[in-house]
Image: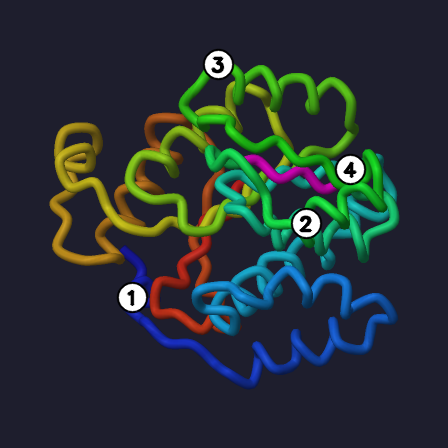
Amino acid sequence: MPAVWGTQEYDPHRFLELLDWVMKRRISYVFLKLVAGASHPVKELSEALSIFKRVYDDDKTRVKKSVVIEVCSGKRGLVAALCALFLRNVTGVAVDVVSDAVEPLKELSSVLGSKLRLFMGIDVYSDEFAKLVESLRREFEYVVMVAIHSCRTLAVRIMEIFKRCQCDKLILVPCCAHPSWARKTVGVEIHGYWDWIYALWKYATEVLQLPARVEIEHAMLSNANAVIVIE
């Protein structure tokens, strides 16, 4: 296991750079309405901005008809909204099991039309979710899946659907662990956060045969800031 995986730190200055970037955009106030009232607005904003910046820096999203599917998006769909607002060739899709989105997200979706699509009330473990991803795979040239705080085997399911649907890129931020799954499936004992990241990486590379890598996103104001990238 690489030594860097045991490092837990974040850099507020990197978050402030991303915040400065979005605040300079003419319609940044539209997006910031989504963050207002969140349980932990600054933390959630830091997470969304850091993942969005990874999508923004991917040149393929500028030259191909692209979709960013935010899985487990919650009621606010922050990454999907950022992509729909600030990337010309990208459609943002927010998917979550919650039954309804917050009003600012619904208002934004009504203004942007099909460029920001909301799919609330969909369980990631359901066939409905798999069929949704398959339909988007057929519609778009370049398919990116992102997920922040995918707890326990949600992260596993997301990787499996990513492979099944032959998507192009996955940016996954796992959260709390499932120790019995890790022990049974990949033989990893979970004693902390980074053991869980290692177990998921091992499952992706050895079981699913996907070219996964683990990176640390210092712009996230959280020690749970590992990012599993597959492309």
Measured in 3D between alpha carbons, the distance from the residue under mark 3 to the one under mark 2, in whole angstroms, is 25 Å
Disc sitting over residue 215 in the figure: none
Q: Report x, y in % for residue 68.
A: 68, 41
Residue name at image x 63 percent, y 52 percent: 79
Nearer the camera: disc 3 or disc 2:
2
Measured in 3D between alpha carbons, the distance from the residue under mark 4 to the one under mark 3, in whole angstroms, is 23 Å
Q: Earlier in the sequence, mark 4 or mark 1?
A: 1
Residue 165 seen in the current view: yes
Disc sitting over residue 3 in the figure: 1
Q: Is residue 229 above or below residue 23?
A: above
Image quarter of residue 27 = bottom right
Which residue was labeled with disc 2? 105
Q: Is residue 37 above or below residue 197?
A: below
Residue name at image x 72 percent, y 62 percent: 31
Which residue was labeled with disc 4? 66
Measured in 3D between alpha carbons, the distance from the residue under mark 2 to the one under mark 4, in whole angstroms, is 20 Å
Measured in 3D between alpha carbons, the distance from the residue under mark 4 to the one under mark 1, in whole angstroms, is 35 Å
Residue 152: say if magenta: no
Q: Report x, y in % for residue 55.
A: 68, 53
The residue closer to the viewer here, 96 or 33, is: 33
Horizontal relation, residue 222 to residue 80: left or right: left
In the picture, the quarter occupied by the N terminus is bottom left
Q: Report the magenta residues as a range.
A: 91-95
Q: Would you say the residues marked 3 and 2 are in contact, meaning their CB atoms lie under 8 Å apart?
A: no
SS class of the residue under badge 2? helix
Nearer the camera: disc 1 or disc 2:
2
Q: Residues within 10 Å of mark 2 (few under 14, many from 20)?
A: many
